[in-house]
Image: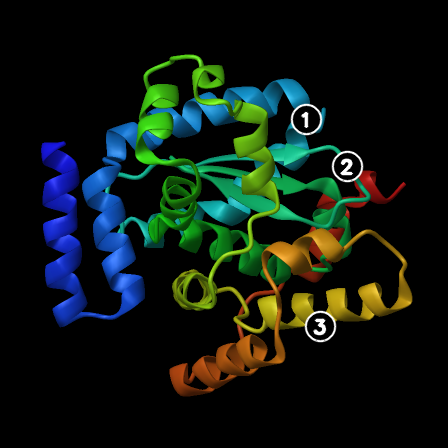
Amino acid sequence: MWIITQALMVLALGMQLTGCTTVRHQLGRVLISDETEYALGSQLAAHIDTTQTSLDNPNIQRYVERIAAPLVERAQVDRPGATYKFTVLDDPTQVNAFAVPGGFLYVYSGLIIAAEDEAELAGVLAHEIGHIVGRHSANQLASQFGIQLLSAIALGEEASKYAVDIAQITAQLSSARFSRDDERQADRYGLRYVVESGYDPTGLVRFFEKLGALEGGKRTNVETLFSSHPATEERIRDIEARIERSGVATGQRNAQRYMRETAVLRR
């Protein structure tokens, strides 16, 4: 009860001083510690590992980790001490990626196939890292399922006591629709990490536009990514404006290497 009272005091003070998004992040930090978030994420990741099929190709796994490595290094500035684990899931029909509290990130093979260079994949990975830095998944789960349940799962207790199971929570993670403010913040974090890592910052914009074309042609199952990360025209224009203001409009794309390293997925 004491921690709830303290959290409400933080919320009341924050409402006087800051915007709603900042208040929500402050409240999330009070209610869910980094340790609890990681423990919760470990439980959820263990469930995902038993219900989803990981790609049986260590070369692709290592390649994704290499692309993500400089992004993670830059993200440490905004959330020091956070750890990240990337897993490629084997489903060529799913053009999606999602983040689990505690730094567990998943990307479907269908998304890797849809991308055409390292910059496009880096843009998506950086955006997901931005969600971890902003604690968006943890905050959203806390709002939907409650602190008591999440803390119980983090401690290894049975979620069934609370009339909900881990499957419901992981389903929410993979199809979560974040708030507009959360998406913008993840975009801004991600864009900075991409630029500082030397990747072409227009990669995420190109990828969003590519998905729009694919969705219109109904060539693949891309609606999941749009429902969880709606690539609205407003968001795309905001990213483009930030790229222009940054003064860095180009960078590494490494398209030939990307196609070579991921060729096995396209056969």
Say which label, 1 or 3, has the lower sequence index: 1
Distance Cα–Cα, label 3 vs label 2 = 22 Å
Q: Residues within 10 Å of mark 1 (few under 14, many from 20)?
A: few
- In the picture, which quadrant includes the C terminus? top right
Kindly identify which numbered label has been placed on residue 52.
1
Pointer 3 and pointer 2: residues touching (CB < 8 Å)?
Answer: no
- Front residue of 58/20: it is 20
Residue at disc 1, secondary structure: loop
Residue at disc 3, secondary structure: helix
Residue 262: quadrant of the picture: top right
Residue found farthest to the top: 157
Q: Is residue 76 above or below residue 2?
A: below
Residue type, mark 1 in image? Gln
Kindly identify which numbered label has been placed on residue 91.
2
Say which label, 3 or 2, has the lower sequence index: 2
Whole-percent x, y for residue 39 in the image:
35, 24
Pointer 2 and pointer 1: residues touching (CB < 8 Å)?
Answer: yes
Whole-percent x, y for residue 205 in the image:
61, 72
Going 81% across and 51% down the picture, which residue do you hit?
221
Q: Is residue 226 above or below residue 93?
A: below
Q: Residues within 10 Å of mark 2 (few under 14, many from 20)?
A: some
Q: Is residue 35 above or below residue 261?
A: above
Tell me, yes or no, if residue 78 can be seen here. no
Pointer 1 and pointer 3: residues touching (CB < 8 Å)?
Answer: no
- Front residue of 182/207: it is 182
Residue type, mark 3 in image? Glu
Say which label, 2 or 1, has the lower sequence index: 1
- Color encoding of the figure: rainbow
